[in-house]
Image (cartoon, grey):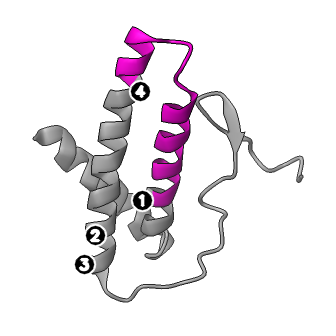
Amino acid sequence: NDPIEPIIAVFGEIVEDPTLVHIEEECNNPTILRDNVKRLNRSVLQGFLTLVTKLVNDPIENKSSRDELSHNIFLMLQECNKFREHQAREILIETLERQLER
């Protein structure tokens, strides 16, 4: 590991930085990426609600919910990174802002 490289943690567990992952496939159709990000965003929201429910009802048994939520966030960031870097972050921010407005 590079000592200068920042450590990324999700729910207290160290994970690979999704911004540094090499994207093997590129997608030239932005509507496909938009639809994938939208689907993953819904999955992240559902996963968050599931995690909160488990934390309230059975706080010890939440690892699978945390793992699933973390994985969906990672996949969403990978989809966003298929665009140019600055566009990826803007699309993620815009999608999440629209979700909050609803």
Taking the view exactly as shown, the residue that stands out farthest to the left is 102
Q: Which segment did they paint magenta? A: 52-75
Are there few (<14), some (14-19), or many (20+) residues within 10 Å of tag 2? some
> CB of mark 2 within 8 Å of CB of mark 1?
no
Identify the residue shown where x is 66% and y is 53%.
17
| Residue 74 percent across, percent down from the top left | 52, 53
- Cα gap from disc 2 to disc 1, whole angstroms: 13 Å
- At mark 3, the secondary structure is helix
Identify the residue shown where x is 27% and y is 49%.
42
Q: Amino acid at mark 4?
A: Leu
For disc 4, the marked residue is 51
Q: Which mark is residue 89?
A: 1
- Cα gap from disc 1 to disc 3, whole angstroms: 16 Å
- Please tell me whether mark 2 or mark 4 is closer to you in this view: 4
Q: Which mark is residue 34?
A: 2
> Magenta segment: does it hold 9?
no
- Please tell me whether mark 1 or mark 3 is closer to you in this view: 3
